[in-house]
Amino acid sequence: MKQAVMVRPGRIEFREAERPAAGDGQVLLRIRRIGVCGSDVHVYHGRHPYTSYPIVQGHEVSGTVEEVGAGVEGFSPGDKATFAPQITCGRCYPCRHGMYHICESLNVMGFQADGAAGEYFAVDAAQTFKLPQGASLDEVAMIEPVAVAVHALGRAGESLAGRKVVVLGAGTIGNLVAQVAAASGASAVLITDVSEYKLARARECGIEFAVDVTREDLRDALRRDFGPDGADLIVECVGAQATIDAAVDAARKGTTIVVVGVFGARPTVDLGRVQDRELSLVGTLMYQAADYQRAIELVAGGRLRLAEMITHRFDFEDYARAYETIDAAEGECLKVMIELAGADK
């Protein structure tokens, strides 16, 4: 089978690899779509701190079940499926206490272990999720980032019903956090960015309040759109000094701030303000099986607008061109999708 291998930063080579078989407890997926995310771009540029080369990417994936291994139930050839790309030890404190997604020895397929950027991929059935046949292959490939959004909002620790939510950053994850918040009963969602292109995409996806913070102060926008009580929850989805500052500055007393963005440089945080206002600053990483199930429910129920988020498509053989296009777009793109030959809708 054909497999895409990133042999070094900026260099993808296609190699012939032996087609895997579904081992005991596994399913073999025929890969149909591969989503490109921001972390993949970091790998392409050699800026991911926990990835070495060569590496096979591919962790946002849709496929159809080709084979079912011994002992596997609930899957049949032709099923549409995706998987959670976590490899955990099962022995450390987090694993033993139900927090396997933050395993002390966590490896992620596509970063510390080979991912699914090939024609076929064998994966444990226990971390594979079947979707309704009515789901599109694009939607199946976006379950992973939707699960990121579901888990992030779950870290707030309370129901979102009737709450007002601010999302800082209108990239793919920020857009999905905003959509999931709205689909989970938030009474109002406001999203910010410095890119009018991304804000326009957010509006297309049904986010009512979209604010360009280069033109309007966030606190003024909150007073106008949310009223004097401001936001109940703030979600930082950029990973930049300016946005963590904005989150702390805009938070009313007692607010929770969930940090989703990945920070390249170590930020400073006004902990005096955090202490004085009793703010809750909460981190989030990846997801658990329940987050995948919730993501599937939202997608299957038609609660999210995912098609509007896909801005570019490339054939598998043009994998490298996808990265070149992302660089050239200078932020004017959202979800980039790689399609494998023969992949239907």
Image: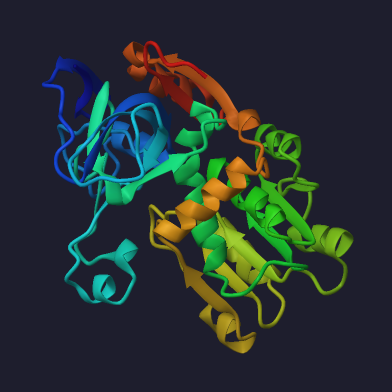
Question: What's the residue at 25%, 75% (across, down)?
Answer: 96
Q: Quadrant of residue 226?
A: bottom right
Question: Does residue 244 appear anywhere in the picture?
Answer: yes
Residue 93 location in percent, x, y?
23, 77
Question: What's the residue at 40%, 57% (across, down)?
Answer: 289
Front in this rendered view, residue 332 or 344? 344
Where is 70 relative to 138, above or below?
A: below
Front in this rendered view, residue 39 or 156? 156
Colour basis: rainbow
Question: What's the residue at 68%, 67% (across, down)?
Answer: 160
Residue 30 location in percent, x, y?
31, 25
Residue 261 location in percent, x, y?
48, 55
Residue 86 location in percent, x, y?
28, 52
Question: Does residue 261 appear anywhere in the picture?
Answer: no
Front in this rendered view, residue 17 or 293? 293
Question: What's the residue at 71%, 35% (across, down)?
Answer: 196
Front in this rendered view, residue 317 or 320? 317
Q: Is residue 158 left or right of residue 321?
A: right
Where is 113 relative to 258, above or below?
A: above
Q: Quadrant of residue 63?
A: top left
Look at the image and tell me in which quarter the N terminus lies. Answer: top left
